[in-house]
């Protein structure tokens, strides 16, 4: 009897390798689509749109990209500059210099400009984080591509990552973490410790350049994980056998990273314009205990009105997993534990300990519950004054928890695939549990708004007629985090090869804070304080002859040649009263000259 045509022509199922390649491609496309979705507000017009809640950091990273490319192509020092904070300069090694990004993307910065390059890197950071975690999970930790995809996508688009996508090119470079984990565990391989140590050393140097704080947290988390894992009775013998080779490889890593980072580390700890600690209050920047069960603002739950304001600002929602995901994580842990052998239990024990320790440390020096500070001291209070630790924000330690949850989700899905539930009700319960936990956290686009364009006075190069080569120009109000225009103008001039002008002040971390700690920007002088007061309050300050003499001293100190006020000043936190700024500057400096679309005051030489 002849075969049925439909059966005879039915295609054979594709081989596993082909299915896996298609799954890999699908994950890459989904990761990229989500990255574009989250950043879609900026893609509408990268040059004229900014992230609403963090336009100051966006302007800073745009400046870093422009300055880094300019420094490399002109043979300047990419880690220290006198183009801002005249005359003292800025130590970029103690700031977030993202030197590797600035160098690698320099051709793109010159081609399309710093704002568009910033957006490309931000988008690629998110997508690459998902792909890198998917790769680590699918190749080394789980067998199923679906399990790896869920784990990788969750980690990359977890609430903390989406929150830091509000302009943080350093923290969104989460793709570094799975690569560091992969290469660290590769040190166990016998006979390859030199090569593996060199690779890890180079990777550590790259990570330090892009996200030093994230590298520090990753190192701490891996130390905790490895210590707990190696001390478990089921893994002690394996850990003891691998230890000599591991330590040799780690020694090579230290030597390679030490050589590559010798100058940056010297600048960081002993160079000019360094500082100790940070300019941020660790009590303010600690994670609220209730935040772990809250929903993030930029998510489906947040859009439905379930978001909260428990973070110190919208860029620091470092936990915000929601109660459903916390419950699901506990259920996953218990389900995995019940079916795990002794070796797998060692891994689960290490994952759980790491998540718990970093959660508690993220509470900071004293606990906060639902935005109410308590008198309950926390473990971070014991270590918060240690070197390096005192420069970290405790709330960000909660970011370590997201990868732990992602790995638990991947392990659970992999186990359910290998050993499906026997009852349909149990299968349905797992499906509903994952949906209830993850769907509310699906990210929504970042909030964006239009920002004031760079004035024609800058874009047309007119400024070169008013400033000598390498001379000092200042906008008013003076450049700082809340008034980022000066560094935006400078970034435009550098990336369009117009030449250099320097500015006093700027948005950076430097010395001058209480007890030798750091602060944002320089210590204010009278002229900067008066301009800030005018722009912020809309009131012209009281001005005397003594005020004018002190302002003249300030301008001489900074070597300012030209003072510039655009028609529209960008205020990162509030609207700026340009008319009051103009009247105040006129009372101090005399009548201005109208040039292109700005007001210009020329400062006569001493």
Image (spheres, rainbow, N blue to C red):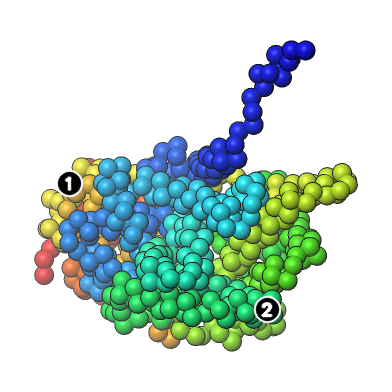
Picture quadrant of residue 560: bottom left
83 sits to left or right of 237: left
For image coordinates 40% across by 42% down, the residue present is 46
Q: Between residues 523 and 299, which one lies in front from this camera angle?
A: 299
For image coordinates 66% across by 84% down, the residue present is 377
Q: What residue is pinned by disc 2? A: 232
Q: Quadrant of the C terminus?
A: bottom left
* Nearest to N terminus: mark 2 or mark 1: 2
The image shows residue 313 at horizontal and vertical percentages of: 56, 61
For image coordinates 67% across by 22% down, the residue present is 10
Q: CA distance from mark 2 to mark 1?
A: 69 Å
The residue carrying pointer 1 sits among few (fewer than 14), some (14 to 19) or many (20 or more) residues within 10 Å by Cα, namely few
Is residue 511 among the parts visible in the rendering?
no
For image coordinates 68% across by 18% down, the residue present is 8
Q: What residue is pinned by disc 1? A: 462
Q: Quadrant of the N terminus?
A: top right
Is residue 122 among the parts visible in the rendering?
yes
The image shows residue 345 at horizontal and vertical percentages of: 72, 70
The image shows residue 423 at horizontal and vertical percentages of: 88, 47
Picture quadrant of residue 411: bottom right
Q: How many marks?
A: 2
């Amino acid at each position: 009897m002849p075969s049925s045509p439909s059966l005879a022509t039915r295609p054979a199922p594709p081989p596993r390798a082909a299915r896996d390649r298609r799954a890999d491609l699908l994950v890459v496309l989904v990761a990229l689509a989500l990255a574009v979705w989250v950043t879609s507000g900026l893609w509408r017009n990268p040059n004229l749109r900014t992230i609403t809640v963090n336009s100051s950091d966006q302007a800073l990273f745009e400046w870093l990209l422009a300055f880094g490319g300019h420094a490399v192509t002109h043979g300047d020092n990419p880690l220290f500059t006198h183009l801002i904070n005249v005359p003292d300069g800025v130590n970029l090694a103690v700031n977030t210099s993202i030197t590797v990004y600035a160098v690698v993307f320099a051709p793109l910065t010159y081609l399309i400009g710093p704002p568009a390059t910033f957006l490309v890197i931000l988008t690629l950071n998110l997508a690459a984080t998902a792909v890198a975690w998917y790769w680590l999970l699918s190749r080394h930790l789980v067998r199923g591509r679906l399990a790896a995809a869920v784990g990788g996508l969750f980690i990359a688009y977890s609430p903390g990552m989406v929150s830091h996508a509000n302009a943080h090119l350093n923290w969104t470079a989460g793709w570094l973490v799975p690569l560091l984990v992969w290469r660290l565990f590769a040190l166990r391989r016998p006979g390859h410790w030199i090569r593996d140590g060199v690779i890890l050393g180079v990777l550590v140097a790259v990570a330090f350049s892009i996200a030093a704080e994230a590298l520090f947290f990753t190192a701490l988390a891996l130390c905790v994980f490895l210590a707990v894992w190696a001390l478990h009775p089921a893994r002690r013998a394996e850990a003891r056998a691998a230890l000599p080779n591991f330590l040799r490889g780690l020694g090579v890593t230290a030597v390679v990273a030490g050589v590559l980072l010798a100058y940056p580390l010297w600048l960081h700890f002993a160079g000019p314009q360094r500082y100790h600690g940070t300019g941020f209050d660790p009590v303010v920047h600690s994670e609220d205990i209730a935040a772990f069960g809250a929903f993030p603002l930029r998510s489906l739950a947040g859009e439905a009105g379930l978001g909260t304001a428990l973070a110190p600002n919208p860029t620091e929602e470092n936990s915000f997993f929601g109660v459903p995901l916390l419950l699901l994580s506990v259920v996953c842990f218990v389900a995995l534990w019940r079916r795990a052998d002794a070796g797998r239990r060692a891994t689960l024990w290490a994952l759980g300990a790491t998540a718990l320790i970093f959660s508690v440390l993220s509470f900071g020096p004293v606990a906060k519950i639902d935005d109410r500070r308590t008198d309950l001291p926390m473990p971070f209070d014991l270590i918060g004054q240690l070197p390096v630790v005192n420069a970290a924000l405790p709330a960000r330690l909660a970011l370590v928890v997201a990868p732990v949850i992602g790995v638990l989700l991947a392990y659970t899905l992999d186990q359910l695939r290998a050993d499906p539930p026997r009852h349909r009700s149990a299968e349905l319960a797992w499906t509903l549990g994952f949906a209830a936990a993850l769907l509310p956290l699906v990210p929504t686009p970042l909030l964006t708004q239009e920002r004031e364009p760079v004035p024609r006075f800058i874009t047309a190069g007119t400024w070169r007629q008013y400033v000598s080569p390498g001379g000092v120009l200042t906008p008013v109000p003076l450049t700082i985090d809340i008034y980022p225009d000066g560094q935006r103008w400078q970034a435009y001039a550098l990336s369009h090869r117009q030449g250099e002008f320097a500015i006093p002040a700027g948005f950076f971390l430097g010395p001058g804070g209480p007890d030798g700690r750091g602060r944002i920007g320089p210590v204010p002088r009278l002229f900067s304080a008066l301009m800030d007061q005018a722009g912020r309050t809309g009131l012209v300050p009281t001005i005397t002859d003594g005020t004018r003499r002190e302002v003249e001293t300030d301008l001489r100190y900074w070597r300012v040649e030209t003072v510039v006020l655009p028609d529209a000043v960008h205020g990162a936190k509030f609207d700026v009263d340009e008319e009051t700024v103009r009247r105040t500057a006129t009372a101090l400096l005399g009548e201005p000259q109208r040039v292109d679309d700005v007001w210009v005051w020329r400062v006569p030489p001493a």
